[in-house]
Amino acid sequence: MDHKKVAKDVIAAVGRDNMVGAAHCATRLRLVLKDDNNIDQAALDNNPDVKGTFKTNGQYQIIIGPGDVNFVYDELIKDTGLKEASTEDLKKIAEQGKKFNPIMAFIKLLSDIFVPIIPALVAGGLLMALNNFLTSKGLFGPQAIVEMNPAIKGLSSMIQLMSAAPFIFMPILVAISAAKRFGANQYLGAAIGMIMTSPDLLAGKSWDIFGMQVMQNNYYYQVIPVLAAVWILSVLEKWLHKRLPSAVDFTFTPLIAVMLTGFLTFTIVGPAMKTLSDWVTNGIVWLYDTTSFIGMGIFGLTYSAIVLTGLHQSFPAIETQLITAFSNGKGAGDFIFVVASMANVAQGAATFAVWALTKDKKMKGLASSAGVSALLGITEPALFGVNLKYKFPFFCALIGSGIAAMFAGLMHVIAVSLGSAGFLGFLSINASSIPMYIVAELIAFAVAFALTFIYGKSHSQLLNPAPVAAPSEPKEVKEAKTEAKKVSGVENQVVDSPVDGESIDLSQVNDQVFSTKMMGDGAAVVPADGTIYAPADGEITVAYETKHAYGIKTDQGAEVLIHVGIDTVNLKGQHFTSNVTQGQKIKKGDVLGTADLEAIKQAGYDTTVMVIVTNTMNYESVERIDVDEVKHGDNLIAITAE
């Protein structure tokens, strides 16, 4: 790669005067631009040295590849005169240009609080769905399964208890997460949640405090009251830390903060916020009951557009209210999950239609993996990588989603838990609604696929533009390229797993650069141990200062990137060690370095390890070996040479 030329090409495509800041990670340039509309996207798409582009969090990211990205970045800095910046610096630069939007700030706040506790709610919700499956009449006969098989009655009762616990004591989960987000002590937050759900609180009873009657309200299932209570806790705790001497701070700050928060919660904040919470829930239920299937259809027609704005990040807070209300015998259940599932499947179907229509090999690979991800509930690769690029697939998917959501509303399909909003979403659906849910999903897929395929077939130039004739090459150059291909030096080989853990497909990775295979094919491992081993004999081509990634060229010619974690470049080497340097020869099984997995998780980062063959295009096939659990040294990726 001619790094200087690539840097000049990037500068020309994005605009020299359009760049505000630049940084890089292990695989991509990260740019903050004044105006994204000034990008010459076609020039970047047609550049053979650019593996892909996308925008996220105010940054325009250009995928170059491990090793090369460092040199391209250096040339870009030299040419533009921009100041070198870290990825953290670039985040601050990106945020400086943003106008404060209180609505989006509130949505992000809710997202930060609820996303970490979703696994517990999903577990409880799926257990609730399983119990509904066992106790619902009419599924396999006039009697419920538990009535036809009395021997499982005890198991059903146990499942019911386990399913209810995360929702009954949800204030404790919310309090822990909210305390972390608000900057309060998480254990004090948990204490506030426990106080609000104490079994000693008796409905209808009150405390007589200096003649004032304070009701003993219990806040089981509640969200809004505990959010307000923990925010008050955080304000009090910070205020006390600043003013109390260190000698008494440790003892009296927790005492005073918890006591005052508890008093304010039971006297003023709790009752007011519980009323507000009831209004919100009742209002949403009223809207659903009033608009019925028509409202569901409109919601389905607009859901993917809502995703583009980020507003959907606030939905889990609403859904938990709907689910808990349903579990208490109020409301119709979670219809938002149903609509989300229809929208995700429709976007996936449109992406598969693009896969069937396009002749571009790069787009086929992206569309196939992005389509699978969308069907499983992760639509970002399909939305941003495929459908919005061509525009018409996105709108065809909206129509499919709207029709399917309308049908689901007509059939009163509702969810009783959170889960994967896609084809696997039937696990979260009320047992009696599962057949109609599956029918609705098939409608979403069929309509979106058919509309996209028909429109794309009649407008083939949108997906397969006529190639621009390239200038003819001299005979000597053609012969040289042919000869170079013959001696490319790649052979069949197997790349081993560099870590112990669970092997997963790249499409499941929560980073679209890897999940859409822009960098190349390979596999991923959810690590059980933090020691990183060499997966093959070869040479270290890249050893990053941040110690979170390694580039290796194997003796058989494969160029392998081992990337430990997602966005862990931001840790700047913290929690990592490295035992190797660039140019060092290694043997399979050598220890490359270590990662403190628990510390990385505590810092808020995904620890998944990606193993990518970055020169995938040199091979006939690069395939993950289908195994679940792997130890380091176990076969992970099979490579077949041309």
Image: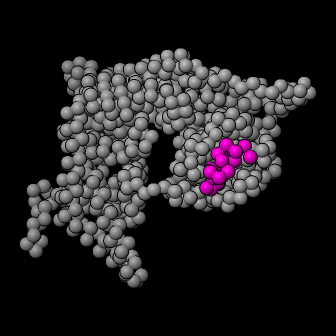
192 lies left or right of 365: left
Residue 635, x across and y down, in percent:
67, 35
> What residue sits 74% from the left and 54% below the top?
79
> What residue sits 56% from the left and 40% below the top?
512
Can you say whether 563 is above or below 404 in the image? below
Decide which of 358, 237 is in the foreground and name it.
358
The part of the chain drawn in magenta is 8-31
Quadrant of the image containing the C terminus: top right
Can you say whether 464 is above or below 338 in the image? above
> What residue sits 53% from the left and 42% below the top?
510
Residue 330, x across and y down, in percent:
19, 39
Question: Magenta stretch: residue 10 in it?
Answer: yes
> What residue sits 81% from the left and 27% below the top?
471
Quadrant of the image containing the N terminus: top right
370 lies left or right of 160: right
Q: Evaluate whether residue 130 shows in this view.
A: no
379 lies left or right of 60: left
Decide which of 165, 149 is in the foreground and name it.
165
Can you say whether 542 is above or below 228 in the image? above
